[in-house]
Image (spheres, coloured by chain):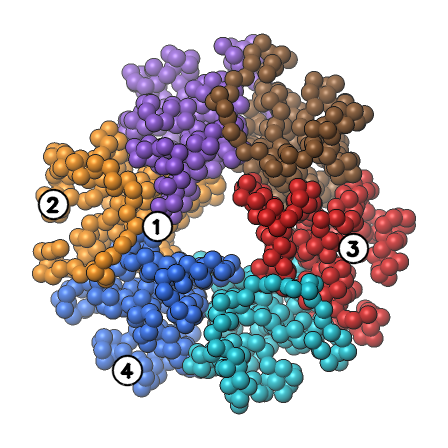
Chain colours: A brown, B red, C cyan, D blue, E orange, F purple
Amino acid sequence: MDYGLGYRITRLDPEPAPWRSPLQALPIAVHRQAAGRYPHPPARVQEKSGFIPNVFLTLAYRPDEFRAFFAYHDALMEKDGGLTKAEREMIVVATSSANQCLYCVIAHGAILRIRAKNPLIADQIAVNYRKADITPRQRAMLDFAMKVAIEAHRISEADFAAVTAHGFSHDDIWDIAAIAAFFALSNRMANVTGMRANDEFYLMGRLPK
Amino acid sequence: MDYGLGYRITRLDPEPAPWRSPLQALPIAVHRQAAGRYPHPPARVQEKSGFIPNVFLTLAYRPDEFRAFFAYHDALMEKDGGLTKAEREMIVVATSSANQCLYCVIAHGAILRIRAKNPLIADQIAVNYRKADITPRQRAMLDFAMKVAIEAHRISEADFAAVTAHGFSHDDIWDIAAIAAFFALSNRMANVTGMRANDEFYLMGRLPK
Amino acid sequence: MDYGLGYRITRLDPEPAPWRSPLQALPIAVHRQAAGRYPHPPARVQEKSGFIPNVFLTLAYRPDEFRAFFAYHDALMEKDGGLTKAEREMIVVATSSANQCLYCVIAHGAILRIRAKNPLIADQIAVNYRKADITPRQRAMLDFAMKVAIEAHRISEADFAAVTAHGFSHDDIWDIAAIAAFFALSNRMANVTGMRANDEFYLMGRLPK
Amino acid sequence: MDYGLGYRITRLDPEPAPWRSPLQALPIAVHRQAAGRYPHPPARVQEKSGFIPNVFLTLAYRPDEFRAFFAYHDALMEKDGGLTKAEREMIVVATSSANQCLYCVIAHGAILRIRAKNPLIADQIAVNYRKADITPRQRAMLDFAMKVAIEAHRISEADFAAVTAHGFSHDDIWDIAAIAAFFALSNRMANVTGMRANDEFYLMGRLPK
Amino acid sequence: MDYGLGYRITRLDPEPAPWRSPLQALPIAVHRQAAGRYPHPPARVQEKSGFIPNVFLTLAYRPDEFRAFFAYHDALMEKDGGLTKAEREMIVVATSSANQCLYCVIAHGAILRIRAKNPLIADQIAVNYRKADITPRQRAMLDFAMKVAIEAHRISEADFAAVTAHGFSHDDIWDIAAIAAFFALSNRMANVTGMRANDEFYLMGRLPK
Amino acid sequence: MDYGLGYRITRLDPEPAPWRSPLQALPIAVHRQAAGRYPHPPARVQEKSGFIPNVFLTLAYRPDEFRAFFAYHDALMEKDGGLTKAEREMIVVATSSANQCLYCVIAHGAILRIRAKNPLIADQIAVNYRKADITPRQRAMLDFAMKVAIEAHRISEADFAAVTAHGFSHDDIWDIAAIAAFFALSNRMANVTGMRANDEFYLMGRLPK
């Protein structure tokens, strides 16, 4: 596999036998070609990054769900406001790591590195966000997001107070919660479909432009 | 509050003080009126049931997310196929109960009673689906759905084998997983926004027509 | 099955196959008849409600345990004092739901609706007591009860302070703890014996008299 | 404190400050004297062991609950049958250790040592029953009891099959479950009331007669 | 087995069948003899207590790991300072009980009884250190140690503040953490190798000299 | 900070405020200089990689523990045999990720990439080893290691059978368990001391030589 970086990945073992979700037996391949023809967003993404992220190829199997998924995703992630785009990706990486979602941690880790212009932050947040090089405000944001991801039924007055104390508005809190909630969905679909992260994501944002 | 059943609910206490999510302070009321004007789906729902479920009123605060949410919902819930509509609602009730989501258990419990034409099934599944009056096939379906809801990262070959043994196709399994995943999102939004179940839901489907 | 309400329950499936505890193979039926002859309490209960709750029929298999069980139950539940009878039932419903006990949630949910004269409260407490329409004092009571139910070994000074702050006396706290403890026993027996909730309970207290 | 063994216990610290349950502030002392006058069972116990176990003194505060508690206890523990008395105590020690109940592990550990005529078995079962010197049949018995203690709502066909394979009858299984359930109650009461184990229990059954 | 105490242990069952780790099939016996010849520490220990603790015999199978293990152990346990030797053993007993390590709870329970000159303290800490007869300072020490043992990734400023408030220095905190961490290793090795506690430990420190 | 790669890391925020362990206030700096003078192993490591990993600098504060730690580490990690060096690092990365240890996942992730000559494998194992590109034999090895890391007290015959079926010898199993156990120690020390991963580790092994 050529990264355009002058080297090829060699796998650990001549015959690796990772888990493959039985859902990969669905006629996803056919739909993958269809997905390649979606005017938006894969084409746009492909143009920018040179490859189509597997999330497009996998979810394209169900066009109606595909459209709803990306409409929801873009409504939450493709805007600025109280949260920067980098901060939105922080929420994705932290909660997806708690859910052990390979695709989301690797792919959104790459996007986080790029948006934060920081090659270290994604790995730090994925392993233990409490020890990452983030501000106290971002720490509070991630504490709230993690509670939504793991035990939303216990969210209480005190949790709201903790983020409000850092200046987050109610609209910001909606965003934090909604991103954590949306990736609760996304992580589960990726885990059940056995969605692989494209090899290209692993190195993205680690080297200077 | 008049149920049209000739009696009024009296609350336990003259001044109940339940938790109210701070997000209810958002100008949701204004949007609630807007939601009342959405041609679809609240109007359709209101026409059938005589009231607008609070999920429409709450999520209407964010129109883009609203549209994506219901498009996703309808793509998963408003079809038959390998799973009946009643079985889809079983998945919602079981996983929403695991997530302690008041709105979803009460509202979808009502829908399940109606779709299954069974006044007992929703409460049984909400409390302990392992003891509910369901078929072994439905039990296997719910076992898979619960694993997606709670620990999707551990889904393995054996889990697929267990549902396949009951005749579920890969498309059916996608549905089971996607419904559990979608309500992972929905439950979290309802819990953070403190979404109340409309009083009308509690009795729906419990009495003969 | 005729409820005396003019309609019959139809089950979801022509041949439902729920889990039946192997303990139902014990000669419980014989003892069920014996239970029907117990002067107290089944007869009294039957007279009031028109049916014998299954907890009497199942536990009657062991007369000594039966007598101790109901003596303990009545000592805790059949009195007023710092806690109303409705509040005592709230503790039962909340902790039994945490223990996923079908019999106790359904049967005591019915009793709670009747004692609180509130058709909504039992379902709310069963799903997530933190979101139920209860007073802050009742919330504190249930927080303490849930800690006894789930991790009594961690009960500390701070937990006592939280309930004392709401005016609960030491005698009240004993009651809260003892009810949660007694249903820890009851829930386990119901789960192991596969005790079904009588169909009549599901609708009790939901309609105006 | 004189054990009648020719030595006195010296505590670790001149002013130990262990946790004392606020419930110890109840007028339990008065009732303790009353308990000393109960013809049965404290007197009988005192006669045999030379002291009154604290469980009698503490629970005597509530005479009705006291009588029901010991009636239930004796119905389960004071008989032989499919389970020996030593095996019944094994269930108490294993499940009480899982519930971190100081009184029950220490007091019933002593009784287990005496009934099994084995000075090591109680400590082994308290720390990790999977590594204790017990038979495979006893291991199966404790696996079932622990599941009742910790997650009775998941008890299934397979759990019954595992104990039935070792020759346990349905009546034996009822006993296993009922003992685990009864001590679920007992452990919670002991933890909330801060019931201390009498110093005498620690050494009982460790020395040859 | 003769304890030198004038009595012999009789096991519960003529043919006990406890779990034996398959690792006991390693040629550990040979190495056990070698261990008997190690000038230090088994010889020293044997001289003092009359037997060689099984941890020496088991780990001797791997001489390099053996030497590192005991060098580490002695660096942490064989010194006084901010923590007494008895307090160091308290940490071992509390965290080893949380890890259900039979060898460590029994063997270090014995050492704790001797070092604290208190026959009750080890059992109390093993069952529920929150109810043990220890000082508030020791309680804070154990709270910190337990957090290191169970969820070190959540250790935060507040945890440090709680122990610092009781006068523990940073060096003391390092000791608390390092002992909990070292026995995290030790407990796991004992559990996997199925290391038995020598019978002699059970009674040590329970009787006056 | 210059990586020798022609670019400098810019942090996400002008004034990042990550958590700093209070233990960093110890006079570790002084000992860091001392560590620089240890003939072995820091000097050797520094020569090879151009920097001193922070684990040497932090643990050097306690020379005796330092020596025991690295003697233990080298006895387990610096040999081949039934497990390759890459496989040993897999165990470190998987279990350290379960323990959310930032230093160990980042540093040993780098070593794993180098030893496996595979730039993707470390991130895959850190996020969800069940989905990583490894052989079934390696999957079984990590299942065993994870059980040792998380619940060693439940290790049973069946766990041994599962790894033995893949050809692991008892000596190999000792290695798997001992590595998981050693990093149980290491992860806890890194988390409590707030050990940072050197920035250099993040990119190591991701680019072709």
Residue under pointer 1: E100
Q: CA distance from mark 1 to mark 3?
A: 49 Å
- Viewed as shown, does residue D79 lie left or right of F118? left
Q: Nearer the viewer, residue C83 or B42?
A: B42
Q: Give residue B54's mark.
A: 3
Q: Give D147 or B189, whichever is nearer the viewer.
A: D147
Q: Position of residue E8 (x, y in %)?
A: 13, 60
Q: Residue at x 89, y 58 (%)?
A: B47
Foreground tag (1 vs 4): 1
How many C-alpha atoms fall within 10 Å of the one at disc 3: few (<14), some, or many (≥20)? Answer: some
- Number of the front mark, 2 or 1: 1
Q: Secondary structure at mark 3?
A: helix
Q: Residue at x 50, y 69 (%)?
A: C193
Q: Number of labelled discs?
A: 4
Camera sees residue C20: yes
| Numbered badge on residue D43 | 4
Q: x and y percent of residue B25 in the render?
A: 76, 50
Residue carrying label 2: E48
Q: Name which residue type carries label 3.
A: Asn
Q: Amino acid at mark 4?
A: Ala
Q: Nearer the viewer, residue B61 or D87?
A: D87
* Any part of residue D94 in sight: no
Tell me the distance, in whole angstroms, between the alpha carbons under discs 3 and 2. 75 Å
